[in-house]
Amino acid sequence: METQHAKEILKHIEKYNEIVITMHINPDGDAIGSSLGLASFLQEVLHKSVCIYNESTFPTWLSFLKLPCAYYTNVQEIPFKNPLIITLDAGELKRFGEELITYIQDKKTICIDHHLGNTFFATEYTWADPSMSATGEMIGHIVFAYQEKTLESVAKALYVALSCDTGNFTFGNTNARCINMLAKLVATPIAIAPLREAMDNNWTQQKLHFWGKLFSEVRFSLDNKFAACLVPLSYFNEYGVTKEDLEGFVEQMRKVKNVRMTLLMREDIKENRPIVKVSMRSSGDDDVRSILMNFGGGGHKNAAGATLEGGLENNYQKIYSYVKQVL
Ligand code: 5GP
Ligand code: MN
């Protein structure tokens, strides 16, 4: 099944010399890893001209992954006339940002994604498979459909993608197919220890103190089945940290026994108006995506997100009213 999709996508790619890779705004480890892995493959193996576009800047916590091509945050900078656009790790156009939506209106597009609810906006081909552990796994299937071995740069980027979206191969999406892909990446070969060092042991002291503050403020409710943490904008200045330093925090709250669902809410400002970026996590049958769909969000059953207008407390109460019905 995946080989068939991979071959179809390779056939489409063959027709273009210039390719723009893009992924959802505020890119996570899977979005970045799958983009960089695909970019390396297209450029170094298929000899295409490639660039990556995202309106968000490249996350510094992933800077140990070397960029194989230009990374633009402004669509005007893209030097190609009529490129193929490959959109990764999201199935709704709005997740790629306003500028990208306008830019791709008259262009050919392919979408590769593992979220539920793909809207099939791509003009040439959509491969949407929620059973895939990560978009990086899907890129792996493409790369290995082309040839049995791949480059170290491709394998490293895809390892990061898989590791991030599977909680380092511990979440429910870690199936045999995912582990088979992991084995192929490791056999490339890549050295795991330095990658883990770069991914795990890179905290600043500020981040440690920031997490300490947040841990002390986690709210438990609904018989301790629900844990939530609200992060005011002022904390970032106060602790000398950035929003990147929150990466992984929402998973930490689930470490507490009996907690079934976690919620992280980060205050921000967009166009002079207060907004809240929401992340929720769960396991098994507890469906956080359904809850955040009520707020225009989405994602996976056990990991979902949304962006809401307004302040922290007000939005917390709104989300809580849905959580209460489920737990
Ligand atoms: P996170 O909480 O790490 O931002 O996101 C968890 C999952 O939900 C990821 O797969 C992410 O792509 C998805 N996600 C995050 N925010 C949104 C959103 O606003 N809309 C949709 N549809 N998915 C989201
Ligand atoms: Mn993903």
Image: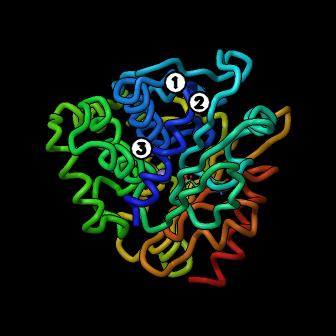
Using the numbered discs, state the Cα–Cα distance from disc 3 to disc 2 in whole angstroms.
Answer: 40 Å
Q: Which residue is mark 1?
A: 50
Q: Is residue 6 above or below residue 87?
A: below
Task: Please tell me which residue lies in front, 131 or 231.
Answer: 131
Horizontal side, residue 254 vs residue 77: left or right: left
Are the two marked residues, 1 and 2, in contact with CB atoms closer than 8 angstroms? Answer: yes
Q: Is residue 314 visible?
A: yes
**Which comes sooner in the sequence, label 3 or label 2?**
2
Q: Is residue 219 visible?
A: no
Q: Circle 3 — which element?
A: helix
The numbered dot on residue 235 is: none
Are the two marked residues, 1 and 3, in contact with CB atoms closer than 8 angstroms? Answer: no
Disc number lying in front (3 or 2): 2
Quadrant into which the N terminus falls: bottom left
Binning the other alpha carbons within 10 Å of mark 1 as few (below 14), some (14 to 19) or many (20 upward) gives many
**Which comes sooner in the sequence, label 1 or label 3?**
1
Binning the other alpha carbons within 10 Å of mark 3 as few (below 14), some (14 to 19) or many (20 upward) gives few
Q: Residue at 41%, 38% (x, y): give it.
A: 33
Residue 38: x %, y % from top left: 43, 36
Q: How many marks?
A: 3
Is disc 1's CB within 8 Å of ligand 2? no
Quadrant into which the C terminus falls: bottom right
Q: Residue at 75%, 59% (x, y): give it.
A: 315
Q: Amino acid at mark 2?
A: Val
Residue 292: x %, y % from top left: 67, 66
Q: Which residue is mark 3?
A: 212
Horizontal side, residue 161 vs residue 77: left or right: left
Q: Amino acid at mark 3?
A: Gly
**Which comes sooner in the sequence, label 1 or label 2?**
2
Q: Which residue is mark 2?
A: 20
